[in-house]
Image (cartoon, rainbow, N blue to C red):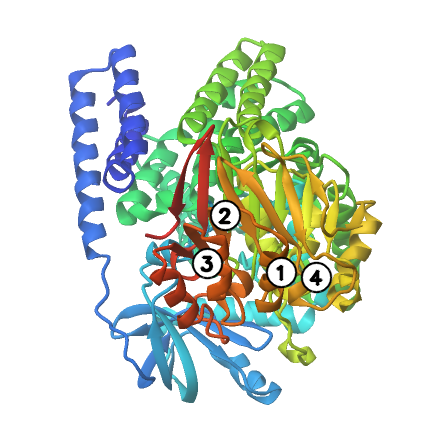
Amino acid sequence: MNRGICLYLAFSVLSGTLLALQFHWGAVVLALLLLSIFLRKKTTTILFLCLLFLFISFLNSIIQEKRQKTVLSSEPEPVDLQIVINDIPSIDGDSFVSLAQIKNEKVLMRYYFSSEKEKRKFQHVKPGFLCEMKGQLTEPKPNKNPNLFHYKNYLAHRGVYWILDVQAFGGCVDESRWKHALLHLRFDGLKKIERDFPSSTVGVTQALLFGETGMVAEDTMKAFRELGVVHLLAISGLHVGLIFAILYYCLLRIGVTKESVTWICIVFLLCYIVLTGASPSVTRASSMLIVILLSRKVANKLSTIESLSIVFVMLVLYDPYYVFNVGFQLSFMVSFSLVVSSSIILNTSSSISQLVKVTLVAQLSSLPIIIYHFYEFSLIGFFTNLLYVPLFSVIVLPLTILVYILSVEWLILLHKYLMDGIQWVSTIIASFPFSTIVMGKPPFLFLIGYLIAIYVVFVWFEKKKYILSMLLLIFWASIHMLSNTYNPYGEVVFLDVGQGDATLIMLPYNRGTYLIDTGGEVQFPKEEWEERKNRFSVGEDIVVPFLKSKGVTSIDALILTHGDLDHIGGSEAVLEEMKVKEVLISPNSEEKGEMRKIMKIARKKKVPVKEAHYPYRWAGDNDGLHIVSPQDEEYEGNNDSIVLYGEIGSLKWLFTGDLEEQGEKEFIRNFDLPIDVLKVGHHGSNTSTTEEFLVETNPSVAVISAGETNRFGHPHPEVVERLEIRGITIYSTGENGAITYRFWDKNGTFSAHLP
């Protein structure tokens, strides 16, 4: 049989799967597959097999997609339930989260502890425990902002359609069976690390040995991500290969026969997949080794590319939704690129040269996937990988395994100093300017262009056209970034930040980028045991990722309308991650404690801070943007919000912050301005948007920024009724998600992220 048939079959399976689940990408892969068969003049037999596997994978994906349905239903009130814990629970602060099973269907269970004593009781809950509880099923929320992580789809791809919010536990009984044995070993291993290792090294140690990153400190994860070495905090194929080689060598040295060693290693690899949480890289590497070991038992041994292709086919046919997993995409893309580039890599006698080539191939091949999902790329990733990969492979990983097995105090101390040193150095390097470059989410055609450009680069590398290769890649990346920066279209985006405000204004051709408020969440005092290591942050988890997805790295003006936390809480992340040219605040609003803290950060980063009131203005679209309130320097809260008026995309806009009735009266007493779009004041509270104000301003569109289920009941029904009676088109972030007005010249269109 043709030696390359396995690779063609893998691409056929990928094409068929994507045609069923994401048609445009399936069409691209199919076109490339047929083009390759035609240009390489493959036989009719290969074409037939490719079409057969394409049809099988297409049909398999359709069938599995139709099976993706729930048999459970939500009840209006909490009900008594019996569930089985079928994964290792995550305990972070006062929260308990785990995958569980109800009537043979997976759900995501959430529970919040009422006391530290109760938290300690749950430390011993393992997979296989049967628990009685009272709870309520709710559907996962869809992603409500463009380009951000779609949690509902992520859960659906894992067969989870419900979140079980538990109100009370009745007790748990251990009914685990033999199938839970490996999960118990994983559970005990993670607990051993928490118990025996210093707190500063627990997260990284768990990541290296068991692929569990939940306890890695946020600063460490962020630094490793910016250095382009975050893959080292997940068990990679290199780690699997190293552990396998150590086991294989040791078994042979103690006299075990080669036949027995093979079967022992196969069993170990199968167990290791479960012990490490079945991450894509571990599953791929372990499965490849198993396929290669089994192929040695037959005359026709498989090559590396064939084993990679076979594993890909098996995994995708088993679960088509693997193709949407970022780790799966990166693992197979990098592995495939390294295998096909092996002749270039091995065509040198120098180990350093080989390491350089391996790093370069891995960085280039991962580029399209990384910028598509994370919108930025580490500029120093090539150099840090040259240092970190050998360091982790030769020193850190073996030492971590040794420390875990022996648990000797002086070794634990040595390991602590090493890991603390690495984390400290990583944080320092990551703080260097230009360590990462924000590129924005590439559109479909640009992503195709990246794939073509990288293919050409690899071809030119073989011909030693290194400078030309780099110039091509730099050229295409520059075109991508310039298209974001000098986009002829402008946008006004009201982000859904829950109960808060955050509005981005991007004028065409980079004429101005303004951010009005940053959202934020109210933090209530908590005891130490309640504090979570991984807390949700509006600034870090919504505002900054969205800005990066748009290719925004610089903000001309950050306008903080007033000092309430739901308007300024995300400012710290924005100031840390973005180049902010100036911050505008309401006069004397710095009296608020949170505003004072944010201004301290701004001044530390040498960002000019201005107290702005009427008649402050600055150049923007057409006649610019004007501050029409406050009109004095006395700060009295909501009614001294900065209110902005201006023409954007041929429409007249009024951004009111939390302006209430008194402030509205002052506005209509002092101004007679035409308004097309009104950002409704104070999230639709009945203390604002009075009838008198609506009569005087007469807007045609109203945008309400409020949380979907907020404790204040915003927007209040009487406000909505006043707007509806006047025939005003209403958009609400609570119902519609992010609201976008996209315009070009004098034409524009409103759109809601959710219908």
Q: Nearer the viewer, residue 47 or 545?
A: 545
Which residue, given by chain and number where applicable, does mark 4 sit on? 201
Q: CA distance from mark 3 to mark 2?
A: 11 Å
Q: Residues within 10 Å of mark 1 (few under 14, many from 20)?
A: many
- Residue drawn at (24%, 72%), measured in percent from left and top? 72
**Between disc 4 and disc 1, whose residue precedes?**
4
Which residue, given by chain and number where applicable, does mark 1 sit on? 567
In this view, the mark in front (2 or 4)? 2
Q: CA distance from mark 1 to mark 3?
A: 27 Å
- CB within 8 Å, label 1 to label 3: no
Q: Nearer the viewer, residue 318 or 293?
A: 318
**Between disc 1 and disc 3, whose residue precedes?**
1
User: Circle 4 — which element?
Assistant: helix
**Between disc 3 and disc 2, whose residue precedes?**
2
**Amino acid type, residue under disc 3 in the picture:** Val
Which residue, given by chain and number where applicable, does mark 3 sit on? 695
**Amino acid type, residue under disc 4 in the picture:** Thr
Q: CA distance from mark 4 to mark 1?
A: 36 Å
- Residue 473 lies, with reference to residue 380, above or below; the image says above
**Amino acid type, residue under disc 2 in the picture:** Ile
Q: CA distance from mark 2 to mark 4?
A: 57 Å
Which residue, given by chain and number where applicable, does mark 2 sit on? 675
